[in-house]
Image: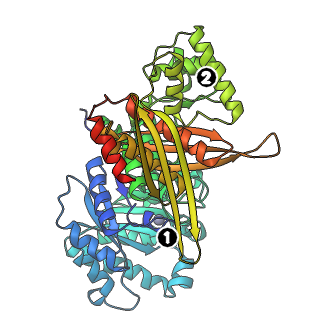
Amino acid sequence: MSQPTSNITLYDTTLRDGAQGEGIHFSLADKLRIAQRLDAFGMHYIEGGWPGSNEKDIEFFREAKKLKFKQAKLAAFGSTRRANAKVEDDKQVALLLEAGTPVVTLVCKTSVLHVEEILRTTLDENLAMIRDTIAFLVKNGREVIFDGEHTFDGYKADPDYTVACYQAADEAGASYLVLCDTNGGTLPSEIATITAALLAKCKKAKLGIHTHDDCGLGVANALAGIEAGALQVQGTVNGYGERTGNCNLVTTIANLQLKMGRRVLPDDQLAGLRDLSLFVDEIANQRPSGRAPFVGSAAFAHKGGLHVNAVNKLAASYEHIAPELVGNHQRVLVGELAGRANIMLKARTMGLQLEEKSPEALKVLDQIKHLENEGYEFEAADASFELLVRKSLGQYKPFFELVEYHVSIRKDSVHGFDLCEATIKISVDGEKVYTVAEGDGPVNALDAALRQALVRFYPKLEQMRLIDYKVRIIDSKSGTAAKTRVFIESSDGDTTWATVGVSFDIIEASWLALRDSVDHLLAHEPKIHVDLEQVVGESMKLL
Ligand SMILES: [Zn+2]
């Protein structure tokens, strides 16, 4: 394992700036879990929150004291003392000390406009606030990181005053002087020029860069800052943050390490980048973006026949890095543009041998084209695609036969209840099983009844759960009835897989996707046989 050699530090503010993003809500437990994960990943600084702004953040720091961090330094975020008051008497500053973190990050005004119009104090008093607060915290044993708000806008309007703010912080003993593009409206060239200008004016502290993505330049601006001499980059995992978000640290880390040769992490940690991104999305209850650079599911997905043909011969021909470096992998999409090369390659990634120009390969291609005409899409439904290939290769043996199912929905407005009920009759090795189950909705009831019938034959089904269910109405060419396409994503706790079903009827479309999902799980699991008589007996009791 090679060790990082770069002197650049990673500063994560997912738990503070990131938590200010629309739709992001972290519980206390979420914050503690993420902090530990960020530490394990290799972040150098983790900003936990603003103790002066809410009770949950105070609680976070109280709980975080009990945790052991491998290497990351925890930072509490806050602002300078109030105007015309003593720093020793400032409650907000006292809370920063009470947080008990080794690092305190201070947001300070550095633009004339904000000092005069927002803070409504004098320019000299603002400089005194910066000096007093930093010196007080340093005297109390804290490392202080200075986050200068609106650095770039302030510098453009009045460079002398912004420089004076940074020099005050430098003299007072801050470890990093961070330049913040708070409104996210600055261009990379301006970031580079102003960072270089401030670097020449500050003698002791290192510089850092904190950018926002309002112009879609959050990462580009952070990299421009680093190239101009900043030695710390601040951002959030997956770019969470106010408005359009913060600089995405995931993308930034990959670029620093793989494109700029600035090693911020050991190589094996970099391979955990995708996992980190997915972990934080999962905790934040966000759907991962397929198009996320480096780590998205589509980042190395190939669809065009020409591209697929080429990557089949040489992966690097259409891939800018080896996907494994960031923990991602190549995918081949089967869709409207599907040529034989796509199908061969995709089958091969699934461990299925399909010879080019073989009758099986032509059959699969024909079938995909036919099904796509019917409204199927296999791009996201890998498990359904695999079943289709297995069937063509004669490698599919049904695990059960459907005899019949019945789904009913009853609404009683007088007594105020909705009831969905499904009954299903299946046969396994010639033995018939009949079950009934209730559910929140018809598909839920059907899923429950099917699993109830099968679980004793295939105990593994107990671990399967549906994690996503999507319905699309497909434009009907006939102009009468519209078809429905149902996507189901399932998980057994270790892996996830996706299936698809299409029909004029939503229940039938759901059934087809559900059946593929169960088939996929069972095809990857040896069957365990149990006493059939007992099973039938117990199933009958359910009636
Ligand atoms: Zn920010």
The vertical placement of 247 against 405, above or below, is below
Q: Nearer the viewer, mark 2 or mark 1?
A: 2
The vertical placement of 147 against 501, above or below, is below
The vertical placement of 100 against 94, above or below, is above
Specify how the rendered protein is coloured: rainbow
Q: Amino acid at mark 1?
A: Thr
Residue for badge 1 = 162
| The label number, if any, that marks residue 94 in the structure image | none
Q: Earlier in the sequence, mark 2 or mark 1?
A: 1
Depth check, front residue: 395 or 445 = 445
Residue at 43 percent of width and 81 percent of height:
126
Q: Is residue 199 visible?
A: yes
**How far from the left and from the top, in percent, is residue 514?**
50, 41
Quarter of the image with the N terminus in it: top left
Depth check, front residue: 426 or 285 = 426
Q: What secondary structure is found at the residue carrying circle 2?
A: helix
Residue for badge 2 = 307
Q: Amino acid at mark 2?
A: His
Residue at 22 percent of width and 66 percent of height:
64
C-alpha gap between disc 2 and disc 1: 51 Å
Give the residue furthest to the right: 479
Q: What secondary structure is found at the residue carrying circle 1?
A: helix
Residue at 50 percent of width and 36 percent of height:
402
